[in-house]
Amino acid sequence: MVHQLRIGSRLIEEDVVTIATVDLGYIERAREGKFDLGWLRDSHAEWGIRARPSRVGLTLRDIAVGSYGEVPDHPPKRTMAPRGCDVDPDVPDMGYSINDKAEVWSDNVMELYEEAVSRQWSATRDIEWTELPELDADLEHAMCQLATVLSEVEMVAADFPAKWLWRINHDFVEAKMFLCTQVMDEARHTEVFRKRALAGGGGLGKAKAVVEQFLKVILDAQSYDEGSALMHLLAEGLVLSLFRAGELLSPSPVEKKIFRLCMQDEARHVAYGTMHLRYRLEREPALAPDFHAYLDRGEEIIAALFATPEVVEPTAILAAGSLKAAEEMGVGVSDILRTRMIEEYLARCDRAGLPRRGRMRLPEIILAGTSGGAEACVEGVAS
């Protein structure tokens, strides 16, 4: 039966099951024990295929047996039916727009999911908030400003996969499940840094337009390819480097634990993004110029972040131990951190099969000291 449904000003038609199309007589027959059993007689299930637990339990890799473990490159249907089951020919089309495995898959996605669910932590009970010391005002302000920026940027890493999850074909369920864990991870990161800003009495700091502009570029990405390159490879990779530095620079064990726990989560997201891009380019190497273009745009905005006081100065103050010491020392520690961030980003691009050395879009003053070097910034400066 065709049903008309109005959404806003649009009138759409869809096939729906109505009471008139249901065999209500079945209810009475079932009461009398007259079962249909078509689901049993007509089953094509692989009887006898048994998934056996490994030493850590029954993992996604353990159940990838027989045809159930075969993830099609291009699924024949767009339904939510579990991969490998018998599918009614009349199932509705869910309208998935990502139906190419290479668009979302990575060879490590099953293992990353298992790690994610086994290492969940609570920002409420697993952080010793009662042991947070009272810091010097300069250090507290610096920590709160850094926590503000991180609370701000972490949520886009939840919003982006959430935006695309419902568009991904259900045959790629393992990738969808992993992205669900990322949404939870990033929500927790936003939570823990917001809590840190408020727990010490300093409160939230300042949000800058340049940070918001970069987040908007990620969220407005026209394809999963574009958004994933900008977020998983570039943005989250830089944040992962910042988390590593944060653990080192933190003024107390409480912050050190926050950064350490967030770091283990972020490492999974970056590992997925790096290996996903590699998987994508191995199957469609002609897409490399597109990915380079995405990163060209992202790097131009990142350059502005490296010159934003609200992003740079808190780390310098935390590293020096006070505002006065930081003013005497300058931002040398921040320069070292920036160099490390860029080097780690370039290494990720190399692993993904998308080398960026020699074509980065960062000014020479930012690239100084990195293996990108002065020759790498010619294109960016010239343009």
Image (cartoon, rainbow, N blue to C red):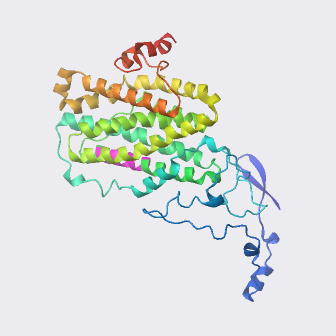
Q: Residue at x 37, y 49 (%)?
A: 191
Figure quadrant of residue 250: top left
Q: Is residue 149 above or below residue 161?
A: above
Q: Residue at x 34, y 44 (%)?
A: 193
Q: Quadrant of the N terminus?
A: bottom right
Q: Is residue 237 left or right of residue 24?
A: left
Highlighted magenta segment, given as a residue range: 186-196
Q: Residue at x 73, y 67 (%)?
A: 44
Q: Is residue 161 above or below residue 374?
A: below
Is residue 192 on the magenta stretch? yes
Of all residues shown, which one is farthest toward the top?
382
Q: Is residue 221 visible?
A: no
Q: Is residue 33 visible?
A: yes
- Residue 87 lies, in percent from the top left, at 73, 62
Q: Is residue 2 left or right of residue 142?
A: right
Q: Is residue 55 left or right of residue 352?
A: left
Is residue 163 on the magenta stretch? no
Q: Main secondary structure of the magenta part?
A: helix
- Residue 144 lies, in percent from the top left, at 28, 39
